[in-house]
Structure formats: structure tokens, C-alpha cells
Amino acid sequence: MHSDLFAHQNMAKPATAPGMSVHNAKSIVYAVDGECYARQGSMVAYRGDLQFEKQGQGVGNFLKRAVTGEGLALMTVRGRGEVWFAHEAANCFIVEIAAGESLTLNGRNVLCFDPTLSYEIRTVKGAGMTGGGLFNSVFTGHGKLGVMCEGNPIVIPVSAQSPVYVDTDAVVGWSTALHTSLHRSQSLGSMLRGGSGEAVQLKLEGEGFVIVRPSEAKPQKPQNG
């Protein structure tokens, strides 16, 4: 049988070592030898002896998710085998976090991660009650984190001399050390005339980077976890 469908770049290749790797722009493959964590419902295929179990959030984190609908609904993957993760054909990337480093990430952009990483759902400082940017997940430890983004991400350096302002519905994540606050870029007169649609942004200051996606988030229904 002959087709471009069977091109070399589309064929699954045997894993050479445990852990995650990018299969293609839209998926991550994880060679499991023990366990890993992933977004609930993100498994698209697997082979081997694997079990998938719903991961609890804990009372505090669950209450935050109930308010925002943006927390991490996770599953644990245990056993030995290979599993492919993807979500709505979003672009996939792997971030390696070293000991002492941390990354703040919106829960909707997490695909999978190593068990050596830990996360905590935290309030975004200075964000007040603003919906989309109120709660994010902070990853610490050491290991790999699978990140997904609708479209090609925009990574913007942040410096003490040059703060960056981002739409709370478009932000993917940022360096945890950055200081966050709300910024109003629209005058009262403009708001009274109907507004520009860009009234409030998240301001990031300090030294680091911020990741945004080239579209605003669609409203999400809260997930049970």
C-alpha cells in the first residue's frame, strides 16, 4: 500500500529511553516506566501495559477550580509502555525545568508532565477578580513539562526597563519570578463610548519572559476533578 500518509515523519518510532519526546508538532509521546501525569482525556493512543486513573485535586485546589474552571484536571498513567498525548490539534512543546527553576502556566495549556515535577494552583498576585488570569499552576522541581498552545506561541522577553502587557485570555505562562498586576489601558471616556475591547491587561515586570498565544481563549466549562 502506497501513500504520503505512510511518510517516515508520520510513523511511530520505538522509544530509546523513558520519558517524553515530541512525536510531531501536534503530539507528544511518553515512554512510561512507572508513572506520569497528563491532562484528562488527552490520550489518543497507547501500547503496552498501562492503566489510566483520575487524579484528585485536593479540597483547596478543587475549590479554586470550581470558581475559575481553569484548573488542572489530571490523570495518572501507570505501568510500562508508550502513550501519545494531544488535544484539539494544538501545537506541542516540551519545557525542561531544572532544580531551582519554576514556571507559571495556565492550566488549559498543560498536556503532560514528569512525576518529578510538582504543581500548585495559586492566585495570580495583583490580578484581583478578573476571570481568565486569576488562578494559574506553578510548576517546580526538575523534569519535563509538555505544553500545548493553540497556534504558534509568542515568547516575549521581560526586563526591568521594559514591562510587558498581555491579554489575560491569551496568556499561556510566564517566569514565576515576574511581578504581576492589572493595568487599565482604556480611558473612562472610551469605556462610556462602548470601549475598545481591550480595557484591562496583565502587567508583568522584572526579569524573565511571558508566553502568549495568537488568539484569545474561548470560554470553558468547569471540569469535574
Image: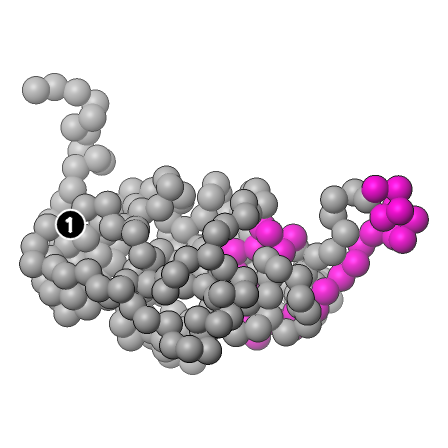
Which residue does the image show at 59% across and 58% down from the upper left? Answer: 132
Q: Is residue 195 above or below residue 164?
A: above
Residue that sits furthest to the right in the current view: 189
Which residue does the image show at 85% across and 48% down from the upper left? Answer: 191
Give the left or right position of residue 70, taking residue 47 as reference. right
Decide: few, some or many residues near mark 1? Use Cα within 10 Å; few <14, some 14-19, many ≥20. some
Give the image location of residue 155, x and y in percent. Answer: 54, 53
Residue that sits furthest to the bottom in the current view: 100
Q: Is residue 178 shown in magenta?
A: yes
Nearest the camera: 66 or 83?
66
Name the colouring of the figure.
one colour
Which residue does the image show at 81% across and 44% down from the upper left? Answer: 195
Q: Amino acid at mark 1?
A: Tyr
The part of the image, by quadrant, that contains residue 145 is bottom left
Residue wearing tag 1: 46
The part of the image, by quadrant, that contains residue 200 is bottom right
Give the image location of residue 143, x and y in percent. Answer: 31, 70
Q: Quadrant of the N terminus?
A: top left
- Judged from the image, the secondary structure of the residue bearing numbered disc 1 is strand
Q: Can residue 86 be seen here? A: yes
Which residue does the image show at 40% across and 73% down from the upper left? Answer: 119
Q: Can residue 16 be seen here? A: no
Q: Quadrant of the C terminus?
A: bottom left
Give the image location of residue 159, x and y in percent. Answer: 66, 66
Give the left or right position of residue 13, taking residue 124 as reference. left
Give the image location of residue 65, x and y in percent. Answer: 48, 66
Query: How many numbered marks, from 0 up?
Result: 1
Give the left or right position of residue 74, taking residue 68 as reference. left
Which range is magenta? Answer: 167-194
